[in-house]
Image (cartoon, rainbow, N blue to C red):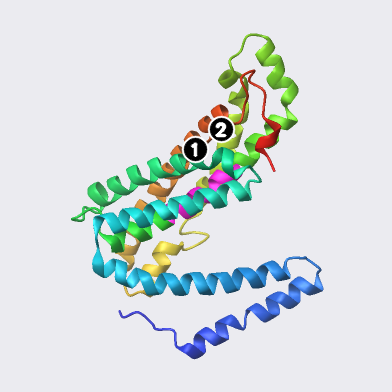
Amino acid sequence: MNAVNIPVSGLVFGLLMVLPTLLLVAYFRLGFGKQLLVAVVRMLLQLGLVAFYLKYIFLLDNLWVNLVYVFLMVFFAAVAGIKNASLRLKKLLVPTFLAMLFPTLITLLFFNGAIIQITPVWKAEILIPIAGLMLGNTLKSNIVALKTFFMLARKEQKIYLFLLGNGASKKEAARPFLKEAIRTAMAPNLATMATIGLVSLPGVMTGQILGGSDPVLAVKYQIMVMLAIFFNSLLSNILQLLFVLRQGFDERDQLIPEIEN
């Protein structure tokens, strides 16, 4: 089976779908028409650039180039995560970057070396797409984890202070917030894993099938990718929140108000 190409006319018709979308947004006064247009333009520019330079990165397939590219992906994911969680970039950039970087590198090495067993493990055409899949999902779960944690820390501040006053450490007093934040962040991943194949055919599998791969091979990749994404997101969320406990509280174990925008 060969991949079905999308002609230029097909791309034009696809972009025309934005028009009825904008009309619906305007009719129901949803208020994000401008953001939608900006998002579509940015998507076109960014993916156009990706299509151009990834072609040469794949041909070059250099270890250091690949690692730099992954580091940049993690950096921009960390920046986006902090901004979308409405937190101070300067205060949390380094811990968020590290909380995403370490799990991603560990998962990538294991995925490439032990699961699909490619040589070398830094092969660009595998390393970069898998890193993108993991970081995209990790970014979403990290945003939810951060928002949930700080919401609970404000809402349940009296409980936190009560536990501190009764001899609990900062980590012990904040443990209920940590647990709930992680559970909330990982809930969509669990739901997706439990219904995959019944409710939806996910991106990796659909992309491979459309690209001409055997459905059995596509299913193998999808299962492994889902497990890798779940592990990566969970480990990143845990590290992120542990770092927040260090950076987001003062020497008296009080939440720093300035950490939130």
Where residue 244 is drawn, which disc sits there?
2
Question: Disc count in the image?
Answer: 2
Going by the numbered disc 1, the residue's amino acid type is Pro
Relative horizontal placement of residue 146, taking residue 234 as reference (left or right): right
Residue farthest to the top?
167
Q: Nearer the viewer, residue 138 or 56?
A: 56
Determine whether 209 is above or below 72 in the image.
Answer: below
Residue hosting label 1: 95
Q: Which residues are magenta?
A: 133-144
SS class of the residue under badge 1?
Answer: helix
Percent coordinates x, y for residue 33 in the rendering: 72, 70
Relative horizontal placement of residue 90, taking residue 47 as reference (left or right): right
Relative horizontal placement of residue 208, taking residue 92 as reference (left or right): left
Can see residue 230? yes
Q: Residues within 10 Å of mark 2 (few under 14, many from 20)?
A: some
Percent coordinates x, y for residue 155 in the rendering: 74, 31
**Label pair 2/1, CB-CB below 8 angstroms:** yes
SS class of the residue under badge 2?
Answer: helix
Q: Residue at x 25, y 63 (%)?
A: 61
